[in-house]
Image (tube, rainbow, N blue to C red):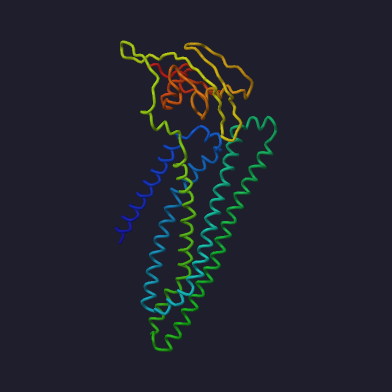
Amino acid sequence: LSITILARNLLFVKGVMESSRKLHSDMIAQAVFYPTAFFNTIPIGQIMNRFVKDLSAIDEAVPNVLNYVTQTGLTLLATLAIVSWTAPEVLLVIALTALPFYYIAQHYRWSARDLRRLQSLSRSPIVSQFTSALRGQTIIRAFGLEHAFETKLLRLVDENMRCAWHNWAATQWVTVWLELIGTTVVLGTCMLAVWATSQGRLSAGVVGLALTYVIQLPAMLGWFLKEISQTEIEFVAVERALEYTHNPVEAQIMKVSRGRSISVVTSGAGQVVELSLAIKMVDVSLRYRREAEPVLKGVTVAIPAGAKVVCVGRTGAGKSSLFSALLRLYDYSGRIQIGNVNAKSLPLSELRSRVKLVPQLPQLFGTTISTAITGPLD
């Protein structure tokens, strides 16, 4: 028996670890190909909540709940089998209480599952607010807005705790009703036992054995229902994680072999020599969201090969949007031509590997600025 339990636990843990690792790998593999618009519209707190809190629930809560519901279900089946064999009359009482038990179970499951979703959704703004406060703490202190940020954070925490409190209240509500149904089962069993004994249909020993197991049924049924409902509640984290494996991605990154390529020249030693290619934009319009106003409206410009061009404009004029269109970070209308190739016909990996860009908030990777921009020379 000990060897069987050990083997079951080892297989269970191995299965859980492999499932969690595969789900995390799929989320990461999908997230790195999300379009830029996704990260501009989805708060960073929501993304962190999916990768931290939800995966933590999948690693810790879901395995424990599955283990408990399996053990409780098998114990409940064994108890019902013993009661059915010793005192079949008890099944009549259980059948009469099955309908209200099912109704209460369904009502609680739906409510508890939606409350957990609300609790998970209300947690994301807390992480976003805290992350924003950490990033902008110098500006917050400069303008004396510490109290305003603290008040907003506490309000978000209150909203999250309100959802948690309703979840706890729903659990207490279903506990009261399940105890009432369980007490009814015990009362009906006792009355049937007295009647069957007086009729000589059951002996005192059989009645005692049946009552011993029937008394355990209320707590066991309540615990089993809670575990079933908790399983559905915890699987909300799995649902939220799987959502990140089905979000739309920049599909052309997956198809590097398709599309045209920018021509290159090789030297006599076989090394690739980069060409300076002319860039031509014709009637290019770009908007960050479909419902938003365009930030670029009919831009037409021609940049000769090897030319050094300076783009000057006020904040919001569209300087960065030009590079966003060139790198195809957002969908645009019009035509951008690099050399003799339409940029939309190029795989994204090919296009972005040829364009060098220093963003407005540069992060230097390397020992020098030159290394950060051009990469290592070797």
Q: Position of residue 16 (x, y in %)?
A: 38, 49
Q: Nearer the viewer, residue 245 or 205?
A: 245
Q: Position of residue 83 (x, y in %)?
A: 39, 75
Of residues 341 and 72, the one nearer the viewer is 341
Instruction: Give the image quarter of residue 301.
Output: top right
Give the mark count: 0
Q: Residue at x 56, y 62 (%)?
A: 172
Tell me which corner region of the image, top left, top right, bottom left or bottom right, holds residue 203: bottom left
Q: Quadrant of the N terminus?
A: bottom left
Name the one closer to the observer, 61 or 271. Answer: 271
- In the picture as drawn, the residue positioned furthest to the bottom comes out as 199
- Compared across the picture, whether 346 is left or right of 160 comes to left
Looking at the image, residue 193 lies above or below residue 172: below
Estimate the x, y position of residue 70 in percent, counting from the top left. Answer: 39, 60
Against 202, is 284 above or below? above
Q: Quadrant of residue 351?
A: top left
Q: Horizontal and vertical percent for residue 246? A: 45, 42
- Residue 99, above or below 110: below
Q: Which quadrant: the C terminus?
A: top left
Q: Residue at x 49, y 33 (%)?
A: 35
